Every structure is written in C-alpha cells, then in structure tokens.
Image (tube, rainbow, N blue to C red):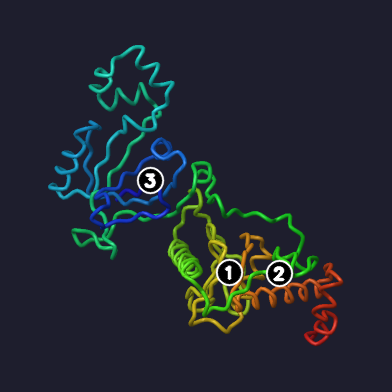
C-alpha cells in the first residue's frame, strides 16, 4: 500500500463531509495545485493510503464519467496527471508557441510531462466519510488530515497565520510585573457561569484542536511541514509535549491526554482539574517558549492559574539565582517563600 502526502485547498479551515450540500469527492494534489485554486485560502495536508486506485487521463469535462466508472469498479480513488493546475505561465506560453491547445490535449501523459516538467499527479478520493466518520462501503477513510494552514507561505513553513513560535526574545516572567507579563493592567475576568456562546465555542475549539494534535503524535514524519513533535520534559507525573501550534500535557504513566494550550486557550479537561495542571501549563509555555500565550480575557479559574504560575516562576528564578524584579519579590514575599521550601 502506498502512502502519499497531498494537499487540498479550501475557503474554510474545516472540511465537512456527508451533508446533502457537500461535495461527494475530495481533490488532492501538490501545494502548487491547491494554491492555484485558493491562493489566499486554507491548505490541508493529508496522508493518503492508496490501495484500490485507478489511473485515468485528465480530460477535464469528462472527469465525472471517470469517477462513476471508478466507483462501479470498487475503487477508493483515481489518480491522474493534472494538466490544468500547477502549470507555470512560462511553460504554457512556450508550449503554445509550438503546439495548439488541441495538440496539447491529445498528448500522452509521458509527452505532457516532458513539455511541462512541473506537472504533478492529482488524486480524487471517492469514498468519503459521513459526519460519523463512516464511509459508504463501511470501511475506514483512506486519508487523514495532518495539518491545516492559513495561506501558502504558512503551509510551506508549517505554522498558521495567527499562531507562531514567537516571543523567544521576551524578558523572563520573573523580571516583569504580573500585569506586564500578561499584557493587561486590568484584564477582563469572567465567571464561568456567565460564559456566552462565543466563550464556549472557544473552549470547544481548543479541546478539539488538542484531541486532534494528540492523535497525530505517533505520526513519524519530521520532514513534513508542521508535523514535528517534541517531548519537552516530565515533572510531577506530567509529560509536556510540543506539537504543531499546541502544547499538550499527558499523564506520564497512563499517557492519557489531560489538557493543553491551543488557539490561545489553556484547557484542562474537567475530570483532571484540581491537580495544578493549568498552572504547570503556564509555566511550561513560559520556560520553554514553545507557544505564545497572550489571552485577552480570563475565566476566574484561568486568572488564578495564571497568577499562581507567575508567582511560581518568580520563586523558581529566585532559587536559581536569576533576576527577580523587586516588585515581584515584595508582592510574593519571595525570600520567605524560598526559605520555607528549602530542604
């Protein structure tokens, strides 16, 4: 079975399948091909397991009949040399100076490749899952989404437009007052019972992103943009893992996903709260600089975790002999706290 890594371009960051108004096929190809369709859209990196595949010649308008024939033959996908996407304007101008459109269309794939060396195969997935993840034939989907990136440059670099591994030159938390560290003198703090639809949606999106990142951790493909994961360290039974655009925390013993940081939100799943995991996530994000965290407002619990994390960071810095701002030493009574914790 061949495994390919292909791209799909779309207007939306999430691909939907199974609806009556949704397409019944999925077109995948090179990043160049996806960028021709959606130059400013979202680019989805897919791992595709090709087993039952049919190869056809790209005929443009007769593609639907090729799809029907392949489905009747029990194929999962069809592959074809794409003659319409991923072709440079320069190559096309040079070819049209020597051949007519009709002559180009009539060329074999082998001859077409010689004239357009940048031409690449495209793939049409025929057996898509429904909203429950089931395919029409009862089998598993032959593709897995590995990453979604906003803009082509970000897809090539392996990071999203809004979340980058930045802030590495920022001064340590111990040298900054709490308000400067979080970036707000008077942050907006909201009690959880007053969360509205937008706040709950942010939390749900974060939880989904963490679960998806966690499922991809065992995918060994460091050469593919956006798939490099790194185990940062273990502490107090918690294992912290840097994943694309996310920081995950797992139980070091059971490997259960406990929570993490994604899309600017710190989340600990309800059944694991009360163990100081949120504070530990804040500390890990600060000390490793593996992900930027600049929340615009907080829940009451989130604000308390962020505050306690700042105190812990100041105490750690003091014990290491690193600089700690006087305001922080006074606010947290760092000298006394260090003496109490000394062995």
Which residue position holds label 1?
240
Dot label at residue 8: 3
Query: Could you tell me which residue is drawn at 38 percent across and 38 percent down?
Result: 37
The quadrant where residue 118 appears: top left
Secondary element at image label 2: loop
Q: Which of marks 1 and 2 is in front?
A: 2
Q: Nearer the viewer, mark 1 or mark 3?
A: 3
Left or right relative to 308: residue 138 = left
Question: Could you tell me if the residues under marks 1 and 3 are in contact, i.e. CB atoms within 8 Å?
Answer: no
Number of other residues with Cα within 10 Å of mark 3, as a class: few under 14, some 14 to 19, many 20 or more: many
> Which of the two labelled residues, at mark 3 and mark 2, occupies the earlier sequence position?
3
Question: Could you tell me if the residues under marks 3 and 2 are in contact, i.e. CB atoms within 8 Å?
Answer: no
Residue 144 x/y as whole percent: 36, 56
Left or right relative to 177: residue 99 = left
Query: Could you tell me which residue is drawn at 65 percent across and 78 percent down?
Result: 304
The quadrant where residue 36 appears: top left
Q: Nearer the viewer, residue 299 or 274?
A: 299
Query: Could you tell me which residue is drawn at 36 percent across and 54 percent down?
Result: 15
**CA separation, marks 3 and 2?**
43 Å
Residue 208 x/y as whole percent: 44, 66
Which residue position holds label 2?
186
**CA separation, marks 1 and 3?**
31 Å
Question: Could you tell me if the residues under marks 1 and 2 are in contact, i.e. CB atoms within 8 Å?
Answer: no
Left or right relative to 217: residue 109 = left
The quadrant where residue 18 appears: bottom left
Q: In this view, does 119 lie above or below 280?
A: above
């Amino acid at each position: 079975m061949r495994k390919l890594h292909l791209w799909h371009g779309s207007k939306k960051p999430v691909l939907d399948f199974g609806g009556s108004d949704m397409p019944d096929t999925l077109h995948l190809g090179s990043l160049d091909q996806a960028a021709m369709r959606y130059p400013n859209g979202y680019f989805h990196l897919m791992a595709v397991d090709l087993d039952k595949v049919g190869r056809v010649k790209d005929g443009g308008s007769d593609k639907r009949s090729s799809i029907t024939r392949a489905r009747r033959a029990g194929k999962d996908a069809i592959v074809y040399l794409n003659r319409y996407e991923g072709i440079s304007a320069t190559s096309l101008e040079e070819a049209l100076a020597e051949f007519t459109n009709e002559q180009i269309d009539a060329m074999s794939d082998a001859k077409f490749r010689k004239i357009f060396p940048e031409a690449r195969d495209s793939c049409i997935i025929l057996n898509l899952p429904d909203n429950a993840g089931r395919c029409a034939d009862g089998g598993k989907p032959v593709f897995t989404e590995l990453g979604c990136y906003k803009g082509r440059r970000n897809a090539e670099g392996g990071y999203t437009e809004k979340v980058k591994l930045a802030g590495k030159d920022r001064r340590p938390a111990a040298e900054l007052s709490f308000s400067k560290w979080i970036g707000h003198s008077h942050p907006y703090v909201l009690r959880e019972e007053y969360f509205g639809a937008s706040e709950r949606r942010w939390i749900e999106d974060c939880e989904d992103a963490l679960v998806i990142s966690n499922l991809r951790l065992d995918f060994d493909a460091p050469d593919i943009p956006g798939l490099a994961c790194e185990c940062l360290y273990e502490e107090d039974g918690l294992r912290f893992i840097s994943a694309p655009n996310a920081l995950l925390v797992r139980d070091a013993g059971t490997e259960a996903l406990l929570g993490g940081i994604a899309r600017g939100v710190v989340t600990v799943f309800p059944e694991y709260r009360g163990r100081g995991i949120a504070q530990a996530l804040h500390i890990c994000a600060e000390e490793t600089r593996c992900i930027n965290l600049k929340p615009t407002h907080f829940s009451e619990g989130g604000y308390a975790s962020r505050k306690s994390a700042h105190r812990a960071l100041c105490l750690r810095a003091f014990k290491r002999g690193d600089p700690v701002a006087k305001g922080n030493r006074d606010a947290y009574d760092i000298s006394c706290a260090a003496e109490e914790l000394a062995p």
